Image: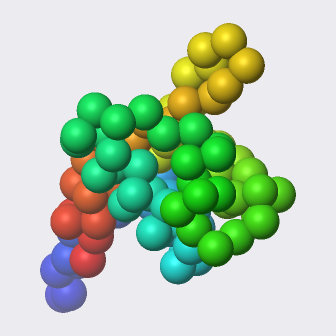
Amino acid sequence: MRIRKETDEMPESEVMLMAKISDALAHPARINIFRYIMTCNKKIIPVCNKDLVDEFDYAQATISQHMKTLVKSGLVDVRKQEKFSYYFVNIGMLMKYLDATKRFE
């Protein structure tokens, strides 16, 4: 008689979270943009699209597309203030992702 090994399945929500965040971080430009926003947030420096265009050698439309992906994933939050949109790293979402990857076997 074989004894079945208990399966340690990940919840579907955790699998979807890992897929969504991994997809958002799958492009080197998005990783660099994300790290830049995180660094600025730590220093309490506001970050808007103009700052990202000045910092990186990408067209404004390209930056906007990358930011759309990061925001959609939940890694970055947007706060509108007058005519500007400011970006903030969602540390809670990042920690959920890191926790899920630690449990991944």
Spot occupied by residue 60 in the image (x, y as percentages of width and height): 77, 57
Q: Nearer the viewer, residue 91 or 103?
A: 91
Q: Quadrant of residue 2?
A: bottom left
Q: Residue at x 74, y 52 (%)?
A: 64
Spot occupied by residue 13 in the image (x, y as percentages of width and height): 48, 46
Compared across the picture, whether 95 is left or right of 9 comes to left
Could you tell me how many numbered marks the image carries? 0
Return the residue found at the far right.
61
In the image, residue 23 sits, relative to residue 20, either above or below, namely: below
Q: Quadrant of residue 1?
A: bottom left
Compared across the picture, whether 20 is left or right of 68 comes to left
In the image, residue 16 sits, relative to residue 19, either above or below, namely: above
Spot occupied by residue 22 in the image (x, y as percentages of width and height): 49, 67
Q: Residue at x 21, y 64 (%)?
A: 103
Q: Nearer the viewer, residue 100 or 1?
A: 100
The quarter of the picture where the C terminus appears is bottom left
Spot occupied by residue 80 in the image (x, y as percentages of width and height): 63, 19
In the image, residue 56 sits, relative to residue 17, either above or below, namely: below
